[in-house]
Image (cartoon, rainbow, N blue to C red):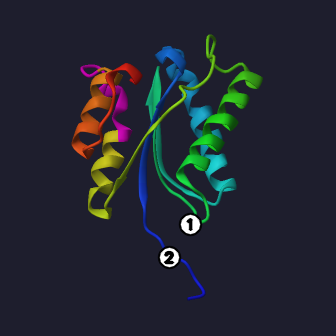
């Protein structure tokens, strides 16, 4: 077979280090555009990105030659360097060490797009940790509370 075809949607979530609430609303859009550029450079398709003060959500499809771990490393490293160089967010010290990544079917895509789009509204009543636990529980991911 001379071509590789994939359709794998990843919902990726990661937090600022120590869940610092530093991603101020008025400055997030340039960060999201920068991460969109990283996606393009990696030949990935960014379906949606959004976030709140302490974490971001990305819905993306990766190029078949790129591993999930390498993708997240590129996004986190590149965006962290850019944030610090541009002095975008006062108090930003970096991203958390880990991340959550969940695959979804094409049938779930629209619901997740809307969910990511409405993060500000969602987090008026649900904390990041509550949200993270719910996502992992729904996906059947076993986790250790000490590392959340």
Vertically, is 23 above or below 136?
above
| Tag 1–tag 2 contact (CB < 8 Å) | yes
135 horizontally vs 84: left or right: left
Q: Residue at x 64, y 60 (%)?
A: 43
The quarter of the image holding the C terminus is top left
Q: Residue at x 66, y 55 (%)?
A: 42
Residue 144 magenta-highlighted: no
Residue most toward the top?
91
Vertically, is 37 above or below 63?
above
Which residue in the structure is indicated by mark 2? 5
Which residue in the structure is indicated by mark 1? 64
Vertically, is 19 above or below 95?
above
Question: Could you tell me how far apart the alpha carbons at marks 1 and 2 are, in whole angstroms?
Answer: 8 Å
Residues 50 and 131: in front is: 131
Where is residue 70 shown, x and y percent of the image? 61, 49
Highlighted magenta segment, given as a residue range: 116-126
Counting residues from the N terminus, which is met first, the one under dot 1 or under dot 2?
2
72 horizontally vs 124: left or right: right
Q: Secondary structure at mark 2?
A: loop
Vertically, is 8 above or below 143?
below
Where is residue 143 shown, x and y percent of the image? 32, 32
The quarter of the image holding the N terminus is bottom right
Where is residue 26 shown, x and y percent of the image? 54, 22
16 horizontally vs 59: left or right: right
Q: Quadrant of residue 4?
A: bottom right
79 horizontally vs 18: left or right: right
Q: Residue at x 33, y 27 (%)?
A: 144
Q: Secondary structure at mark 1?
A: loop
Where is residue 95 shown, x and y percent of the image? 57, 26
Count every numbered label the image shows and give the total: 2
């Amino acid at each position: 077979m001379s071509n590789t075809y994939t359709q794998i949607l990843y919902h990726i979530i990661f937090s600022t280090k120590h869940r610092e609430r530093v991603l101020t609303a008025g400055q997030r859009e340039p960060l999201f555009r920068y991460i969109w550029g990283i996606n393009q450079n990696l030949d990935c398709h960014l379906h949606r990105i959004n976030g709140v003060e302490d974490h971001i959500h990305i819905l993306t499809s990766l190029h078949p030659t790129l591993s999930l771990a390498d993708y997240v490393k590129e996004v986190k490293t590149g965006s962290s360097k850019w944030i610090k160089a541009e002095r975008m967010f006062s108090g930003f010290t970096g991203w958390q060490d880990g991340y959550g990544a969940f695959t979804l079917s094409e049938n779930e895509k629209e619901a997740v797009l809307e969910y990511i789009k409405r993060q500000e509204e969602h987090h008026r009543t649900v904390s990041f940790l509550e949200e993270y636990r719910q996502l992992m529980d729904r996906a059947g991911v076993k986790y250790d509370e000490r590392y959340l």
